[in-house]
Structure formats: C-alpha cells, structure tokens
Image (spheres, helix red, strand yellow):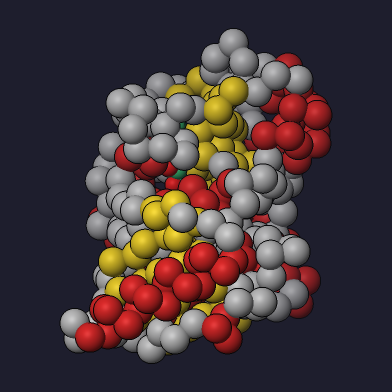
C-alpha cells in the first residue's frame, strides 16, 4: 500500500485535503493524524473492520481497547449508555483537551473497538486539525497512538512514517505535538472517578472539578499484584532496545553514580547514553548525552522524552541512564512512562 503524506499547517486553508482524509476513514481506511498529546492512528470507530485493521497495522493485541475521538459534545450520547454528572463537569472543564473518559458503552460501539469490554474510552482533542479531520471522518474516530506496538508513541509525523509507511492510507503531518505524552485516562463507571493513566491533566486538576478522585493501584508500581484496569497498561510499552536504568537522588550523587557506571559499561564494550537535564547534561561522560529539558518547567521534558528514546534506538545505544523526575504535576506522567520504559529498574541513592 502507498502511504500518502499531506502537510496541514492551518486547517482553514486545507479543507480539501482533510475532506479526502475523512473520506478514507468513512470507507474503512486508516489515517494517522496529529493531536495535542501524540499522533493517533484513526479508523471509523463504528466499523468493526476498521478496528481490526488498526490492530493489524500496529501489531497490537486485539484485547487492548481503542480510544474513540469525537469533535462535538452532542456526539457523545450515541456512544455511551449514560453520562454521569461528574463526566459532564469534567467535559465542561477539560474538553476539548488531553483527557480520556471511560463510560459504559452503547450498542452502537462494536466490541472490536473496545477490545471486547462493555465500556468505551472517549476523548475530544483540542488540536484544530484533529477536530476538523474527525468531523470530515463522520464524527467517531477510533485511534490508539500511531506507533508500532512496543515503540514510543510518535510525537512527530516523521516517527509515524517510520512505523506506518506502507501500512496505512494516509499520514496528516501537522508538525511536532505540543504535550508529548498520552492523555490522562479517568474511569467514570465506578462510584468515584479513578485515574487509570496519568497525563497532562493531573489528579489535583480533576479534584478541583469533581472532588475526590482515586488512582488505580497499578499506576506507578509493578508490585501491587493487581491487573491494571486499562488493559494497555499491562504491556511493556515504550521499551527502548537498550537497557534503561533510572537513577534517583541528589544532583551530586546522581551525576557521580551515573558517570561511574558509564566508565564501567564502556569498558565492557557498551555504547552508552544519558537522559539528563539542561543544568546537568554537560557533566555526563556518556557516548551520547541528551537533555530532556528544564526541571523548572517539566512540560519541556514531557515533550522531548519519546523523541529521545527513539533516537537512542536509532543510534543503537545499548545502556542508558536517566535522571529521575518529580512526581508532582505532569512529572507523575513522565515518571509513569519512564518507569515502564525502564521495566521499573530504578536505583535510589
Ligand atoms: P493509546 O491510544 O495507545 O494511548 O492506548 C489507549 C489506552 O486506553 C490503552 O491503555 C487502553 O487500555 C486504554 N483504554 C481504552 N479503552 C478502555 C476502556 N474501555 N477501559 C479501560 N481502558 C481503556
Ligand atoms: Mg499507545
């Protein structure tokens, strides 16, 4: 299959192109598109064949449900059995935006889209091109992240093309994404809202709107002995080819420890890499050292993390060390993804 790549900078001037993209989805094809979080791999959410194609293109197990993307609040009732009051308030506060909510599904949503579950995940993204594309596609676009299974989610069209060229009909190139980590997922089918995956919208932000919010026990630890409620969270996602170890402690101790380990591993013939920050990066002696950004604004780190992990793969780095990040604010989402990538290997100094 030939994959067409189209550039869309301003959806106003590109309506013809997005109409063509929407048509592809309406007749059962797949189109990757930019959102504010990461790139999505979109198909018709109400067409079971489209869901099957998405799983095939990603190489993803079909028990891992997809997120249904909408572009108007009035399209939500078609997908869900009921809209709890908390969901209405959260939609009011955070949609369009990086929040996914889980509802009991309506019969309109095929089980292929939800991985056989009787619940459905729904999000309204804020990215202008995404909204225009979803409208052209008929209003209901099922989309996981547009990476091959086991790779970091793509934060630019270049990475989508690396993973999906020849597997899907079209890629909409809207440049680099803004946030760089997947949406916050909140389950609204229980008595209290439960965060299943941390993201840009934090627990504190949710609690300001709906009061008490719980966190899924499996979110930050691999030792809870429970199965995660978001089936996707059980897979070892985002794993780089090399080993990745996170090092937590004071700046002095962390830089000294990592440099010691780098010497040892270089001696063993490893190509080494470091994920540091603007302040510390010049002090590391790895073969390749990359700053993820600035600790004063952890949003910079969220935006760069997946790109860095992909680059280390391309550069065939075999041993990577990363500094650890705060678990407040978006830092919790950063650490959640980093811990997964590291297979929970963390050294506390
Ligand atoms: P991705 O689109 O790649 O970020 O993956 C979608 C995530 O949403 C996966 O972790 C899924 O397990 C999760 N998800 C989608 N639908 C549901 C649902 N009905 N219940 C719980 N988690 C869901
Ligand atoms: Mg994903």
Residue closer to the observer: 126 or 238: 238
Does any portion of residue 165 appear in the rendered image?
no
Q: Is residue 8 above or below residue 269?
A: above
Residue drawn 27% across the image and 85% down it: 266
From the top left corner, tell me how far across and down residue 325 is, in percent. 58, 56
Label tally: 0
Residue appearing at x 68%, y 55% in the figure: 131
| Residue 326 visible in the displayed image | yes
Would you say 136 lies left or right of 342 here?
right
Query: Measured along the vertical axis of the image, is residue 196 above or below residue 137?
Result: above
Q: Quadrant of the N terminus?
A: bottom left
**Residue 32, image x, y percentages:** 48, 65
Q: Position of residue 198 (x, y in %)?
A: 57, 42
- Looking at the image, which is closer to me, 209 or 260? 260
Give the residue at the far top of this rendering.
191
Q: Classify residue 166 as left or right of residue 205.
A: left
Question: What residue is rendered at 53% in x and 57% in y?
Answer: 249
From this view, report whether residue 290 is shown above or below residue 123: below
Residue 247 sits in quarter = bottom left
Rendered position, 262 above or below 221: below
Q: Residue at x 34, y 53 (%)?
A: 345
| Residue 261 locus on image (x, y percent) | 34, 73
Point out the residue furthest to the left here: 268
Quadrant location of residue 90? top right
| Along the line of sight, the residue nearer the viewer: 192 or 265 | 265
């Amino acid at each position: 299959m030939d994959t067409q790549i189209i550039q869309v900078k301003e959806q106003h001037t590109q309506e013809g192109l997005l109409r063509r993209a929407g048509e592809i989805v309406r007749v059962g094809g797949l189109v990757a598109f930019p959102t504010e979080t990461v790139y999505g791999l979109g198909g018709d959410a109400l067409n079971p064949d489209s869901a099957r194609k998405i799983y095939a293109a990603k190489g993803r197990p079909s028990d891992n449900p997809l997120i249904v993307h909408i572009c108007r609040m009035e399209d939500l009732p078609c997908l869900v059995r009921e809209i709890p009051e908390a969901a209405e308030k959260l939609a009011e506060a955070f949609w369009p935006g990086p929040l996914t909510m889980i509802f009991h599904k309506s019969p309109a949503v095929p089980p292929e889209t939800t991985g056989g579950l009787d619940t459905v995940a729904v999000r309204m993204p804020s990215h202008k091109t995404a909204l225009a594309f979803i409208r052209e596609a008929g209003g209901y676009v099922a989309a996981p992240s547009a990476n091959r299974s086991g790779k970091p989610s793509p934060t630019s069209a270049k990475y989508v093309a690396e993973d999906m060229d020849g597997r899907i009909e079209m890629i909409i190139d809207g440049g680099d994404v803004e946030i760089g980590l997947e949406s916050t997922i909140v389950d609204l089918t229980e008595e209290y809202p439960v965060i299943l995956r941390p993201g840009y919208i934090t627990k504190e932000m949710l609690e300001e709107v709906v009061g008490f919010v719980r966190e899924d026990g499996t979110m930050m630890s691999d030792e809870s002995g429970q199965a995660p409620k978001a089936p996707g969270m059980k897979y070892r996602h985002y794993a780089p080819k090399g080993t990745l170890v996170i090092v937590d402690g004071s700046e002095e101790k962390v830089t000294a420890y990592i440099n010691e380990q780098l010497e040892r591993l270089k001696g063993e013939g490893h190509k080494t890499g470091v994920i540091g920050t603007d302040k510390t990066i010049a002090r590391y002696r790895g073969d390749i050292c990359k700053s993820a950004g600035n600790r004063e604004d952890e949003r910079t780190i969220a935006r760069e993390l997946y790109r860095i992990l992909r680059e280390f793969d391309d550069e065939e780095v075999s041993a990577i060390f990363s500094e650890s990040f705060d678990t407040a604010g978006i830092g919790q989402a950063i650490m959640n993804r980093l811990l997964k990538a590291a297979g929970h290997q963390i050294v506390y100094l």
